[in-house]
Amino acid sequence: MPFSRWSSKQERTFGKKKEKWNGDFRTPPKPNCYYTKVKGKCRWCGKKILKDDGTVNKRKSWHKKCVNQYMLIYHSRERRAILRRRDKSRCAKCNKISRKWDVDHIRPLIEQKGLKEEDLDYTYYSVDNLQTLCKKCHREKSNSEVPLKKKTKFHNNFFGERKKQDMISNDYHIKVYEGLIEYGKYSGTHWYGLQSEKTPVWKWIQHRIVKETPNQDIFDIYLVGGLIETWLTWDADILILGPYDPPKIYETLDTITRIGFEEHFWIDVSYQDRLWDIHNSNNWIRDEEFGECRLSNHWSKNGKADEGLLKYEYRHGLYQSIKVLPFQKHLDNSEKLGYKYKAPIKLNK
């Protein structure tokens, strides 16, 4: 990356007093070591810069990877150049190549708003959180994030001072798991943990599901449990209901699974012969059987397979088995803790 053209600009802050951060979440503060005048020590990570023989290289002040990270955050031209080389101007959503495209943060930076300097998550500014979007897809994703942007507002206090009131609720909390998940022919790393279906990340995923999933004229798509409950979850449970048509079931399951891997949120999608009334615990029938079809019987996390799926038998191009409900966790939550599950949400009209 061309860092030399900026070198004179960086020299002016070398050894100077650290600037006070103005709270702009779009431009995070530079680390303390950025202002420390110590040759042989990286200005970004603060670690020693070593030569091949293990001695300190006092002629340098940056690690190569730290230069890239710095330029990525603070120089928009270099940010666009990185994505142009990586994505070749191809939209990550519609897969079309366009001369006019935008740099988009997969996890929106607005989620960093209101945080203190020590609480900022710098993975939001990494290249792994960037994607290329055409103007249309970027506009659609931005519109899905509007509710989150409205959650932070300003007000005047008793003394007339303008103060920031952080109104972001727990519904918008997100975590990231960096492990490897494999399912059938798909694999991926860096997975979201979401607090509810109200998060902009899920709203965008749901938009893609409704927009891209085929056969919606014969199948109903339901969101059940997990994401619509009161706890942070690492997956969305989706059920496909409709006539038993194996080729179309496979096509539908494959599309939704692919969207989940592309958006880094695990979607546990399956076809079921009928809908279970999870929200009506009084009507539960112990050991009630439901026919279920899946895309694959292989699911693993960091190489550890889910042995429960191995019992599924391969028939008509799908992996099929009998699901027995309620699970023990449903009984414990309902009977011991008094928890009332929420009703399934129909995603398609």
Image: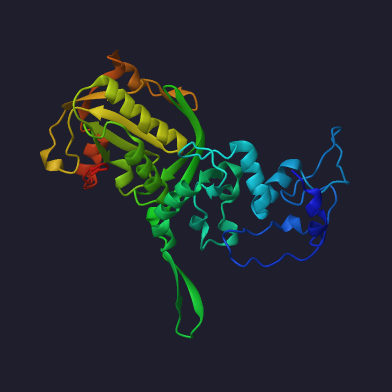
Q: Where is residue 152 in the image (x, y as percent from the top left)?
A: 44, 65
Front one among 253 and 44: 253
Tell me which residue sits at (49%, 52%) in the image: 108
Position of 329 with respect to 125 (left or right) is: left
Question: Looking at the image, is 177 positioned above or below residue 290?
Answer: below
The x and y percentages for residue 55 are 87, 38
Q: Front-most of 249 and 272?
A: 249
Looking at the image, residue 155 sits to the left or right of residue 123; the answer is left
Q: Quadrant of the C terminus?
A: top left
Nearest the viewer among 44 and 200 is 200
> Which residue occupies 45% across, 26% down?
186
Whole-percent x, y for residue 260 in the image: 41, 35
For the image, the number of numbered tags is: 0
Left or right: residue 323 compared with residue 95: left
Dividing the picture into quadrants, the one containing residue 270 is: top left
The image quadrant of residue 88 is: top right
Does residue 180 show up? no
